[in-house]
Amino acid sequence: VAERPLVFLELVAGEPTRGSLGLLGRAREVFGTVAAVVFGPHARTIGGGLGGFGADTVYTFDENPLGREGAAMDLAWTHVDAVAHLVEEHGFRTVLFEGSSVASDIAGALSARLEAGVNWALSDISLNGEAVVGIRPSANEALRAGGGRVRVGWVGPRHLGVFETDAFAPRRSAARSHVIDLSPVVGPTGSGESRRAVRVVSGTTGDDPASRALGSADVIVAGGRGMRDASVLRTLEELAELLGGAVGVSMPIVDRGWYPYEHQIGSATPSVRPRIYIACGISGSVQHRIGMQQSQFVVAINIDRDAPIMSFADVGVLGDLHQLLPQLIELLRRHDGAREPEPTD
Amino acid sequence: VELALTVADATGWEVVVVTMAPASAGAGLRRALAMGADRAIHVADPALAGSDLLPTSRVLAAIVRRESPEIVFFGAGSADTGASLLCAAVSERLGWPLLSRAASIALTGHRVRAFRRTDRGGIVAEADLPVVVSLAGPIGTIRHPGLSDIASARRKPVEVMTANRLGLSAEESGLAGSGTRVLGAAPGQVRSKQTTILDGPAAAERLFAILQEWGVGRG
């Protein structure tokens, strides 16, 4: 029997993430067939549309997000039960996740539950005969920058893989998906209280896709300690808007409370991989570099020629960002303005 | 360690620091003891060499069962180390709730409330003790031990632990107990970037021209 992997489809604000749809398409390409698992009140509706992204079978689970006290519940750990059920009762050997906070919680727990090896930070997957092989960019920065890759494998019958965030773009497929609702079999996930329960007191529970926008941005304009005050971020936003991009910041900016954490770029947050990365007043610490080193082109605007970022930028602009950015904005505006009158007919 | 010490300051609880690393890596433990931790457990065992997430989580869960703490803290680690998976694996083995990516925590009676920094934004969540907490990133201010703290840390107990004493068999340890393997590496090319330096009054215009070559802008 051919290997058929299962892809955990993560929803943010009720929509599948771009990266998990992309993973579905890539898995279909590699394995020839792929199933998905979706959780949530609209899982069946979403599942019906997943054939268009490569899934031939979609397993769905209703969610009961309220605990006995009526408190909202964090359901990640209950998803472990459901995915383990699919592995044990439906014969899946390989479960793939797009990297995220939720995916880490589930994949880590699933690894212990099933005693299955987990490879993470994967950029691709392939089949070598019967064997599943994961590709991970080299952890060594210099090697990684040159395309250095490590091939990783699994021991034992069950394989868990966590991919980099937004590793693949979604592909359209002509396949139709067969939706199987397992809620009646397993019961709604997250029902009732348990000693393992995690209650959500407040906060965004799926409505803040800011860092996802950062994850799929073509251009990122990022600010660091070289900005004289928080108002400079308005200038960065303006530039990002003109370039059709998003704003990122280094960790010290979040620590100062100048900008939300969702926009932080560094080693503790999912890596970004824009085509163009414009670092404004960022020295280029190792942590920051880990978060952005997969950018294709890097521009560094800095007053210090010896800042570390100058050694790995494609273009280093020596100067004061407070003067340079308004000039650049002005040039882009003039350019846009000059083009607008052109007839579009 | 800082977060654990803060909890201990308020509760009087004991703080035990644990590391699983070769025998040579005791400096981190000494530093934690100097900061105020009460004792340390150093899992140093050649039998654990090559351990991936599976044996590592077995070892840590075995230590937690032995020590029966109220809270298990995990440091943030970098995104590449799999630290975010490890805390989940340990919480699963223990059957304890997990508050992952905590930026701060507050303990009220039997409940821990955490501000979690997830990739979907901040979430305030709470769970009952005992609980596994992993940190979102470095904690702002860390206490710096004085000379007398460093001296007294040398008298604090560091217990050296092995997989065998924790009840792990050879099949559960090290490479033999792991679920993953590195198959090989393709080094790629070491690329040292040529940086084009722009300065002077025309820098913004030259940058604009380069960005255009790269095809940016709307439309």
Image (tube, coloured by chain):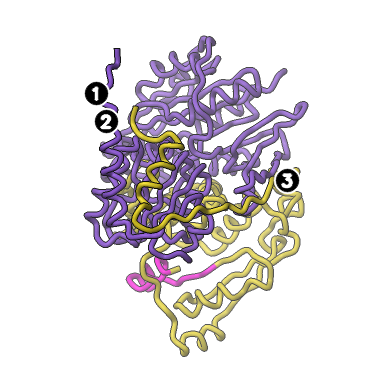
Chain colours: A purple, B yellow
For the magenta stretch, what is the residue range?
B2-17
How packed mark 3 is, by other alpha carbons closer than 10 Å (few <14, some 14-19, many 20 or more), is some
User: Which is nearer the eye, B105 or A224?
Assistant: A224
Q: Position of residue A195 (x, y in %)?
A: 41, 46
**From the image, which quarter does the C terminus of chain A lie in?**
top left
Residue A134 visible from this viewpoint: yes
Q: Position of residue A255 (x, y in %)?
A: 32, 60
State left or right for residue A15 relative to residue A259: right
Mark nearer the viewer, 3 or 2: 2
Residue for point 45% across, 64% down: A305
Q: Which residue is mark 1?
A: A341
Q: Is A280 located above or below residue A46 in the figure?
A: below
User: Which is nearer the eye, B67 or A336?
Assistant: A336
Q: Which residue is mark 2?
A: A338
The answer to whether the residues at label 1 and label 2 have Cβ atoms under 8 Å apart is: yes
State left or right for residue B195 relative to residue A128: left
Residue for point 32% across, 36% down: A67
Whether B14 is among the magenta residues is: yes
For label 2, the SS is: helix
For label 1, the SS is: loop
State left or right for residue B183 relative to residue A280: right
Q: Is A118 located above or below residue A55 in the figure?
A: below
Q: Is A169 located above or below residue A239 in the figure?
A: above
